[in-house]
Image: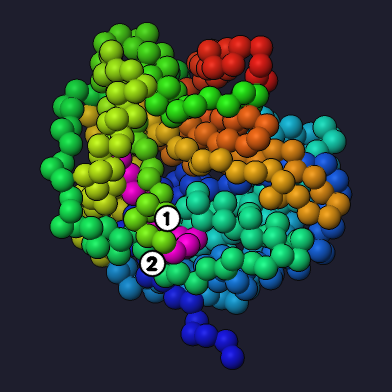
Amino acid sequence: MSGPRYVRRMSPMERFSLVIHQGYRYHVDGVLEGQGEVDPVRLQLAVDRAAAANPGMRVRMRGVLGFTRWVDSGIAPRVRELPLADWDGSSERGASFLDQPLDPVSGGPVADVLLVPCRDGQSRLVFRTVHAAIDGRGCMHWMHEVARALRGDVLQGSTSTLRDVDIQARFRARLGPPPPVLDEACLPVVPPSRAGRHPLRYLWRRVNLHRPVTHLLPKAAQFLAQWARRQGDGAVAFTVPVDYRGLRIDEMGVGNLTGYLRLDVTERATPRQLMRQLNERIRDYADCRAFPGAVWLPWVPLSRLRRRIRPDDETWLYEATSGAPSGGLVSMGTVRLRDFDFPGFHATGIYGLPGAVGKLNVLFGNTEQGSPVLFTAPAAYNHDGQLDELVAAFRVHFSGSEAES
């Protein structure tokens, strides 16, 4: 006998992510690449089985305002086989199929899977998910589950309906004092071009570091801050997501079970000091602090929220402001490529595409073959090659001739 239908209330952060998604295609997309031919029928059967064990992947948006829920539709994400693509997985070039967003507001799915054969001899599977319903760790769990299903392994499964606000409420009494907030406006890492800002479009770049770099996040924060200060003096700060799974809770969930910290990078900060700052803020449960407006946000219509945010886009995306950080830094930890092998397919790489939001997002991962690093920014930050210059310098700084982009 099947259990009760999976239903999860939408959290304020998920609702805010949905507003961002309406303007910027705010996805969490994972890419698995490798050698071999993947049968789309067999892949769909595996997706069906994995989704049945993880009904949070089958949800649809239901209800209005604070009564909005993610409800299991019983319909698994759809596999779409695409024509041969001239795409190497290192940027958005040749991947126009990624531009079309999923549309949960109109009742559409929150996930799908693209099967993309590529001219470079690699087969790429793109696991697309809407950030408002699924976070980075949830997407990674989903990719693991589909690989297990393709091998015929036992699935881990998840029916958790926990939300970030539920976890934050558990630890509210343990919150330490709020960290000091710098009034000085945060510098962007690279300066935006003054012309051609609209329409808003995000670019991304991938660098493969072929040697592991210990404590890459604080080292990258230091490097990016030094790069930002080439424009002049100013504050630099990054948003760092903190996964609650394994840190605050033991159960697995595919929804947004993530808190956020602010990492302030002073001019003379060392990676060791930055790591200490992160650890101290985690010790003080700063990641469990609800964001401003969380109480009233569910009761404002999505259309009104979008109209309220839109006039500020030009300011917080392109200007140095105290309310917006310099960017975001995301560490997805270490995965084993062999965990994504299945009959007929040998995994050679796995990486995530950073969400299309903010001035700059940088995402790190680690495999036994090295560390893929992904950068994303609005197109205005590369009209004069600014982003490409930063990516090239990052590659040389962290691995010299040992890396390729």
**Quadrant (top left/top right/bottom left/bottom right) for the C terminus:** top right
Residue 258 sits inside the magenta stretch: yes
Q: Residue at x 64, y 67 (%)?
A: 155
Q: Foreground residue, 272 or 80?
A: 272
Name the main secondary structure of what is drawn in magenta.
loop
Q: State the mark number for residue 17.
A: none
Q: Residue at x 15, y 57 (%)?
A: 173
Q: Say if 238 sits above or below 386 in the image.
A: below
Q: State the mark number for residue 245.
A: 1
Q: Foreground residue, 383 or 360?
A: 360
Residue 257 sits inside the magenta stretch: yes
**Quadrant (top left/top right/bottom left/bottom right) for the N terminus:** bottom right
Dot 1, how many residues are within 10 Å of its Cα: few (below 14), some (14-19), or many (20+)? Answer: some
Going by the numbered disc 2, the residue's amino acid type is Leu
Q: State the mark number for residue 162.
A: 2
Q: Helix, strand or loop at disc 1?
A: loop
Q: Say if 169 sits above or below 311 in the image.
A: below
Tell me where the magenta segment starts and ends, as one range.
251-261
